[in-house]
Amino acid sequence: MPQHQITDFYIPLAKQDEYHQSTAPYRLHVGGFGSGKTLNGLMEAIITCLLVPGCSCLILRTTSPDIQNTVIRKFLDEKFVPRWVYKSYNKNEKIAYFENGSQLRFGYCQRDEDVMQYLSTEYAYIHLEEAGEFSYRIFEVLVGRARLSTEVKDLYGNAVKTSIGLTTNPFGNGWGWISTLFGTAKKPKGPVKGMGRYDPSDYFRVHSTVKDNPYIYTPEYVKKLESMTGTLREQALYGNEDVVGGQMYPQFNTGQHEGVHVMEPNQIRFRSYEPIWCGSDWDSKNWPVLWLTKGWIPDKIHGGLRQVTVAFRELVLENMNPVQAADAIARACRHQCTHNDCGDVCENPAHAIKRVTEPLKRFFFSWDRFIRHENNHTVAQSLGDRLAKYGLPRPQAADKSRVDGWSLIGQMFDLDELVVTTDCPQLIAALPTLIRDTPNDPEDVKKIASVEDDLADSFRYAVKSYLPGGKKPQALADAEALDRILDPVAQKIRAYEQWVKRNQGPKTYQDSRALPWMVRK
């Protein structure tokens, strides 16, 4: 391109330029509608193709129609990308070819396995458009493909730094891992659970709104955005990163659920006779297990205590077979080990478990793991055989009705009958990221391969298949009945009646019926 310069067709806006100038290996441009995100990612790929002869770049969306109707449409519009910028475009391959030998590929990646089609090529730049729709697994695999030989130089003889870019509105099931890695206005950066290495300086984030784009920021367009309601307006107009549009559970939101749906364990009264049960969704990579029980919290309306269902423990297993998972589940339960001085829970893997002391009554498990066979055994059977050795219940198929399960969780949140303790931080972080599957089935959660989705399914299994409250022991019921009697004489009389009832032998009955040969004729 000797007779032309990049600035002949593209002069970035201030926020777009921040994105281009960053040297971080992972860059995020997040914001509201019309803030220039899509063009930002497209131009970064084009600039890379022009500056690095013979390189390959990749832009992805979740589906082929999506990439066609958004990024490709912009690329083929000469208002944005003049025809002289590239040599040719093959609409069947969805690949743009440049005079210097570079290629820009447009693709889709709807399911985790779709990413495998891009593993045979090294890319100088990879871009995820509407990254909130992608799972962390897809991003994780693509990280290994953003690489080039150290001998590759750009037009100016500089070594090329490969990178992955993300542009998105601040919503989608994938927003959970994105906001974790890159942080938000209110949330600091941090690693995704299980990461082997995390350097905050590798993750660059720029935020913009429609006000940062003078080509779109008109009174008419702003009026349209202002007419929206609730969280959608917050995100469309302001690009608010700390609210999730289309939430399945808007009542479970940061800053609103503390003390209502999220409590410290010491704020809840637990009783030993109440049953404990688990919900678990098996996945080849992530295997979450949640423990639930009944608890009592202060009733602010009627006084006294009221019963709620409580998720009080979580365990996210990674890359484990059923036997390893069963051992980890047993160790997470209250138990006694061979060293009696370790207390109720021994975290030393070198200490063998003597017995599990927790009264776990049911283990609700992914219903499809009772069908799929591995080595002539289902996952549920292999897990159950190992759990049984610890005296724990074998898995039983969870209720698989998705819509009914999500609906029940929502109703229990509305009635303040469902509580998650702070000992379940991953579940607390996952619930606000669940969005409705609009327009396909707004009553269902949009499914995406992520640990947040697996945690939500485990929660749904446990809540939908929940156990009724336990039967109060008679001794405790008698003691509570005595406490309600204020008169000491009446209390002693009632206590004596209770003693007689407990100690009297079984009633005997005399059969007055006469046998046939005893009847006188």
Image: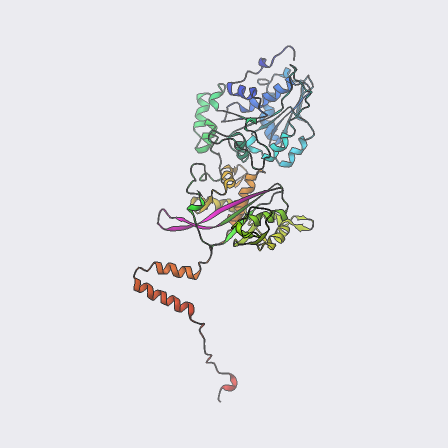
Magenta residue span:
293-317
Relative depth, front residue between 513 and 473: 473
**Mainly helix, strand or loop, the magenta region?**
strand
Question: What colour scheme governs how the chains and residues are painted in the rendered image of this protein?
Answer: rainbow
Asked whether residue 334 appears in the rendered view, the answer is: no
Relative depth, front residue between 265 and 214: 265
Asked whether residue 380 appears in the rendered view, the answer is: yes
Instruction: Give the residue drawn at x 67%, y 30%.
Output: 118
Instruction: Give the residue drawn at x 49%, y 46%.
Output: 311
Instruction: Give the residue drawn at x 67%, y 33%.
Output: 116
Relative depth, front residue between 373 and 388: 388
Query: In the image, is residue 306 part of the stretch drawn in magenta?
Result: yes
Place of residue 5 in the rendered image (x, y in percent of width and height, measured from the top left) = 61, 12
Q: Is 142 situated left or right of 13 in this image?
A: right
Query: In the image, is residue 51 part of the stretch drawn in magenta?
Result: no
Total marks placed: 0
Place of residue 88 in the rendered image (x, y in percent of width and height, measured from the top left) = 67, 19
Place of residue 65 in the rendered image (x, y in percent of width and height, measured from the top left) = 60, 30
Q: In which quarter of the image is residue 450?
A: top right
Q: Is 258 situated left or right of 388 in this image?
A: left
Q: Quadrant of residue 119?
A: top right
The N terminus sits in image quarter: top right
In the current view of this chain or complex, which residue is farthest to the top? 3
Q: Is 454 situated left or right of 511 in this image?
A: right
Place of residue 449 in the rendered image (x, y in percent of width and height, measured from the top left) = 59, 38
In the current view of this chain or complex, which residue is farthest to the bottom? 521
